[in-house]
Image (cartoon, rainbow, N blue to C red):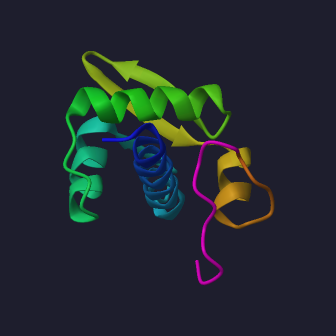
């Protein structure tokens, strides 16, 4: 897979994760559930790959993370919400389309 295509896949997956966190009543999901969400959108990746995306999104300020035993829990931040709602742009996460 080319570097450009890999970056596109990662940015798309990060947007899917943010959108799913945004619709949760408490804005949180664990990495196992997010694996299943991504699979439903055609991203069949390992749990470790999903964790890498979550940690990258934490570096970007889009999510906060906590660990519960061997599970990583992601919670959307205000910056993440603003990105999903197109009020701001976070580089490294695909920009949502207008019909969010």
Residue at point 42% right, 48% down?
5
Q: Is residue 54 above or below residue 9?
A: above
Asked if residue 96 lies left or right of residue 33, the reply is right
Q: Is residue 23 visible?
A: yes
Whole-percent x and y of residue 29?
38, 44
Q: Is residue 64 visible?
A: no
Residue at point 19% right, 49% down?
44
Q: Is residue 50 above or below residue 93?
A: above
Asked if residue 4 lies left or right of residue 37, the reply is right
The number of numbered badges drawn on the structure is 0
State yes or no: residue 98 in magenta: yes
Residue at point 73% right, 66% down?
86
- Residue at the front extreme? 2
- Residue at the bottom extreme? 99
Whole-percent x and y of residue 20?
44, 59
Residue at point 29% right, 54% down?
38
Q: Is residue 88 above or below residue 74?
A: below
* Magenta span: chief secondary structure: loop
Q: Nearer the viewer, residue 92 or 85?
A: 92
Whole-percent x and y of residue 17?
44, 51
Asked which quadrant contains residue 3, the reply is top left
Magenta region? 91-100
Q: Quadrant of the N terminus?
A: top left
Whole-percent x and y of residue 89?
75, 53
State yes or no: residue 13 in magenta: no
- Residue at the top extreme? 69
């Amino acid at each position: 897979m080319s570097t450009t295509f890999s970056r596109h896949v990662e940015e798309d997956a990060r947007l899917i994760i943010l959108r799913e966190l945004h619709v949760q009543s408490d804005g949180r999901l664990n990495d196992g559930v997010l694996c299943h969400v991504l699979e439903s959108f055609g991203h069949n990746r390992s749990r470790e790959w999903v964790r890498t995306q979550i940690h990258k999104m934490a570096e970007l300020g889009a999510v906060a993370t906590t660990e519960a035993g061997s599970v990583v829990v992601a919670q959307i931040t205000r910056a993440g919400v603003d990105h999903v709602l197109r009020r701001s742009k976070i580089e490294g996460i695909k920009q949502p389309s207008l019909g969010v």
